[in-house]
Every structure is written in C-alpha cells, then in structure tokens.
Image: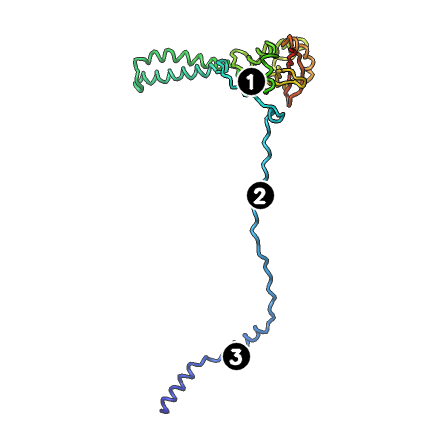
Amino acid sequence: MSVQCAAHAVRALAALPAPASPRRRATCVSLSLLPRRPGRAVAPVRAAEPSSPPAAAPAAQPSGASTGKAVIPDDEFSLAKVSFGVIGLGVGISLLSYGFGSYFNLLPGSEWSALLLTYGFPLTIIGMALKYAELKPVPCITYADAFALREKYATPILKQVRSDVTRFRYGDEQHLDEALQRIFQYGLGGGIPRRSAPILQKIREEVTEDGKYSLVLVFEAKALELSDFEKRQAKFTSFFGPGIKAEIGKGGDDLYEVRLISEST
C-alpha cells in the first residue's frame, strides 16, 4: 500500500503546471505596469451619395409655338414637288441591273435583256443630268391665319412666287434669280458682284399687325448689309407689284427679311 500511495503522489505532482521562470515573470509584471494609450475614436465613413443629374435645359420651341400661332403643314401633293432626277436614276438603274442579270442568265427573261439595256442607259444618264441641274425647294412656313387669307387677299404674283420657290427647278442657279438680278444689278454700276448675291433660305406666310396677308422672303447674304436691302426697297415693291408693299427687316446672323404685304382689300 505504501508503494501505491507513493505512485499516486508522484502522478499528482507531475500533473501540476511548471512554475514560471523569474525572467518571464518579471516581463509580465513590467508590461502590466506600463500606462495604456487611450484609443482613438474612429468616426464611421459614409459612402458618397450620388449627385443628382443636372436638370435638362428646356427644348427650344418652334417659331409657331413661341408666337402662339398654329402652323399649317405643307402636305399638299404636287408632281412639281417630286425630283425627276431621283425618278430617272431609280428607273434607269433598275432596268440596267435587271438587264445585265438577265443577259448573263442570272435572272429570268434573257430575251428582254437587250430592250432593258437599251432603255436603261439613257434613263440613267437623263436622271443623272436632272439630279445635277436640280434646285431644291425652300421650306415654307404657313400660319393658320395667313392660310385663311391667302386665296382672297394674296395677289397672283405672290401666289406665283410661293409656287415657284416651293417646287423643284432645273437649270436655275438659285430661286428668284431673275428678280434678284434686276433688283441688285449684278456687275453694273451701283450694283453688287454676283458672288455677293443673296440666297433665298425659306419663306413664311403670316398676317401683319393690321390684319393684312404678307409673304416673307428670308435671304442669307454674308457680304451685304441691311442698308443694301433698304435702299432697294422701292425696287422690291415695283418688281413684285402691283398691289403690294415691301418692308425690309433683319432676321438674324446674315439673314434679311423682305416682307411683301398685300394691299388688297
């Protein structure tokens, strides 16, 4: 029994933890005596909020809406408003394409290939010539109140001017070429050089403040001044008369307006 008791005592002593060394104990004591630094408070960081997009600028209103007047669309069909150059090119190229395809047996109808090629070549050439010589129509803005007065108060010359400048023309350098040549006297004494000639950009049909029908011609002239138009005001009246009165105004950058006011009652 004494031997067993001694063995149990040895096992109990072996299970006890080993005593810390003096050096390690001194280090732990010295570290525990050091003053602690106060911790810094860290503020929470917020994610940057996305900035709202800038408000879009209001869209520019058309002239008709800005003046509070309704605009009549120019949707009246007329053969003069169709480009014959486009028609000639379309028909000619179609005939040529099918003619070559049938000639090389890529398409049916080889017996018609010679006829298709015979008509396709001249139609294509004529279409190219018309396309090269065509003068496109200018835009026309017609207000509702002026549209109601056109048939009754517009003079025949004003109606003809409106019809001429709103259709395709062929062989003319610009719209109203004859009128501008007589009014501005290209290359003559007291006139202007032809390269400085004004170019018609658009026309407007509107009613004046005193209720009269007027046709406004808007020209672009980079080499001219307002005085060049004002001193020819009487010539505009005499050329587009009788029964009208011409007024001159400034439209914008390099733009000048000639207002042809009907005197019909």
Q: Position of residue 36 (x, y in %)?
A: 60, 69
Q: Which residue is mark 3?
A: 22
Determine contact: label 1, label 3, CB under 8 Å: no
The residue drawn where x is 54% and y is 21% is 73
For label 1, the SS is loop
Looking at the image, the residue that sits furthest to the bottom is 2
Q: CA distance from mark 2 to mark 1?
A: 44 Å
Q: CA distance from mark 2 to mark 3?
A: 68 Å
The residue drawn where x is 49% and y is 14% is 78
Q: Amino acid at mark 2?
A: Ser
Q: Quadrant of residue 109?
A: top left
Q: Nearer the viewer, residue 241 or 258?
A: 241
Q: Which mark is residue 138?
A: 1
Q: Which mark is residue 52?
A: 2
**76 left or right of 187?**
left
Quadrant position of the C terminus in the picture: top right
